[in-house]
Amino acid sequence: MWVMPLVPPLSLTALGGDVVSAVATAGVTAVVVVVGAFVFAIAMLFRRREGARPSAATGLASLTTTANVLLVRADEAVTAGEDELGFAIAQFGEERTRDFAATVATARRRLRESFAIRHTLDDPHPESVQKQRELTLQIIATSERIIADLAGHDRTFASLRSTEVAAPERIESLRSAIAAGGARLAPTAELLERLTADYDASLIAPFARAVTDASAHLEAAATAADAAAAGLSPAGVNAVAELLGGAEDHLHRATQLLDAVVSRDRELGAAQVALGELLASAKRDSAEARAVASTTPDPNSGAVVLEAVGAVEAAASTAGRSARNPVQALDAVGGAVERLDLALAGARNQQARLEHARAALEGTLVSARSQISAVRAFIAVGGRRVGADARTRLAEAERELLVAEAGADPVEALDAARRSVTHARDADALARYDAQR
């Protein structure tokens, strides 16, 4: 008889071991999953942080403010450096000031470049944000370099002056120059009175206090010279350099103020002459335009030309009745002539355009120079209240004027001169706005 073999029963110990092993394996797997999820979360967090790095626009407004402040300081540093160079040449000669002159010239060039960049940033179609940031940083770096370079030379010449041993001769020279400046006060006051009587007040306003301020500077110069004379030492080692420097500075400012009135007289006289020539040219242009209007192939073109002729004749009539503001009259007539140019552009041959441009160019150049001079004088009075915007427009007006003066093509030169007038007008408006704030 077959008997079923006996199988030993599983022991509880063996069964428990298998269960424990299974549970341990599952626990390890869970831990691995949790750690993996944690590592993945950390990685994603860092990725998000990497993606949240500041954009190029971060801090751009603050950088722009810094650039504007430094640009104003650099502009003032260059102006002061040019004045200082004049003092240094007079005191130490051209040979000893050659390096300083080169530094001032380089600083002026870099300043023009910085103003040109600033003008680019004002463009209605601006660069990318990254490019704006780069250009703004370039303005900051260049302005800081200009200020530092000029300050280094200022310290050098201050040291030279402190060791100047020819103080007695300088005092005598100063007193002679102060006396010569004093002799100019009365004639300049008479000239200013005539200009005030002959011209619109807006043309003379920046120079109204020129004689009064010049007189005050001459008095301050004389006081400083007297104090320096009292401080002379019999030993020949004179610690009066600061007094003499102050006296020379006051004398220089007085001379600038008196010269500015004389220059204004010349500028307004030139504007009167230029206006007369422009009016004669405008009269010829109007006659030519009427002839052209009668031969245009379509009525609309003729009407546009005649409308422009009417604007020229109206501006010329107004200018002829009022001679008190030749600069404004030049602008008005020049603007009307420019409009006529556009209307006649298709009717004129190239030679006629060149001849017309030459006739209009001189008056426009006079207008640009006069307005630039007035704005520069206003900024000098306004000081740091006048910000970077006005100074940028003025620098652009000066740059366009240089282009116009150097232009071989009269048409292109006329366009540049007209742009210079526009920028100068904008600079004046911005400077007056800043001064009133």
Image (cartoon, rainbow, N blue to C red):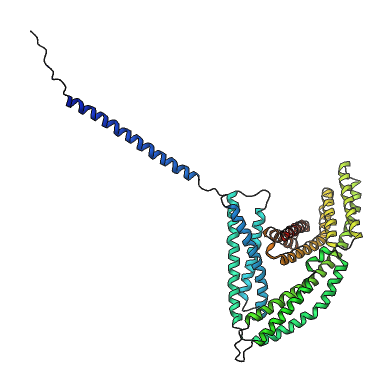
Q: Say if residue 104 shows up in the picture.
A: yes
Of the pair 194 and 285, the residue shown nearer to us: 194
Q: Position of residue 59 (x, y in %)?
A: 57, 52
Of the pair 143 and 271, the residue shown nearer to us: 143
* Drawn side of residue 109 relative to residue 17, left or right: right
* Drawn side of residue 290 relative to residue 166, left or right: right
Q: Say if residue 93 shows up in the picture.
A: no
Of the pair 234 and 93, the residue shown nearer to us: 234
Q: Which quarter of the figure has residue 303?
A: top right
Q: Position of residue 409 (x, y in %)?
A: 76, 58
Point 67% across, 53% down: residue: 122
As drawn, 89 above or below 300: below
As drawn, 144 above or below 301: below
Q: Position of residue 63 (x, y in %)?
A: 59, 55
Q: Position of residue 373 (x, y in %)?
A: 76, 65
Of the pair 99 and 151, the residue shown nearer to us: 151
Point 88% across, 53% down: residue: 312
Q: Which quarter of the figure has residue 406?
A: bottom right
Point 35% across, 38% down: residue: 35
Give the quadrant of the N terminus. top left
As drawn, 51 above or below 312: above
Count up the numbered dots.
0
